[in-house]
Image: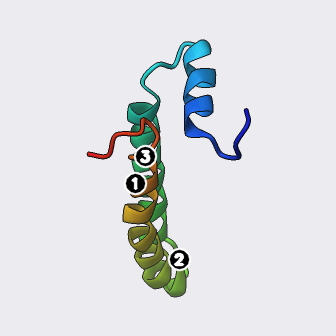
Amino acid sequence: MTESFDLKDLSARLEAKGLPAVEGVAKLAVTEILDWASESCAIHDNPLVKAIGVMAVETVRPLILEQVDKIDGVQS
């Protein structure tokens, strides 16, 4: 790697390990993790976690997915 956070390098490394569809897998994983976090916050006993946690997850969701969309170098 010659550049920090080089997405092409990450993609090549993952492909070498048998994970060719890096962006698709990342999007699936991130979406499931964010859904899990949002649902967990929604049923939490603490009312602040319920109110702020869900809002926080839903606020960062598009920002994270935007970055995931850049992995293959083609934005959809």
In the rendered structure, the answer to whether residue 11 lies left or right of residue 3 reads left
Residue matched to label 3: 70
> Within 10 Å of the Cα at label 1, are there few (<14), some (14-19), or many (20+) other Cα atoms?
some
The residue lying at 53 percent from left, 79 percent from top is 49
Instruction: Return the residue nearer the eye: 4 or 30.
Output: 4
Query: Which residue, as the protein is rendered here, is positioned at the far left?
Result: 76
Residue matched to label 1: 65
Q: Name the N-terminal-most of marks 3 and 2.
A: 2
> Within 10 Å of the Cα at label 2, are there few (<14), some (14-19), or many (20+) other Cα atoms?
few
Q: Residue 1 location, x and y as percent?
A: 73, 32
Observer-side mark, 3 or 2, equals: 3
Q: CA distance from mark 3 to mark 2?
A: 37 Å
Q: Quadrant of the C terminus?
A: top left
Q: Name the N-terminal-most of marks 1 and 2.
A: 2
Q: Name the N-terminal-most of marks 1 and 3.
A: 1
In the rendered structure, the answer to whether residue 1 lies left or right of residue 20 reads right
**Kind of residue at badge 3:** Lys
Q: Is residue 64 visible?
A: yes
**Circles 1 and 2: CB distance less than 8 Å?**
no
Q: Residue 26 location, x and y as percent?
A: 46, 38
**Kind of residue at badge 2:** Asp
Residue matched to label 2: 45
Q: How many marks?
A: 3
Q: Secondary structure at mark 1?
A: helix
Q: CA distance from mark 1 to mark 2?
A: 28 Å
Observer-side mark, 1 or 3, equals: 3
- Vertical relation: 13 (above or below) 17: below
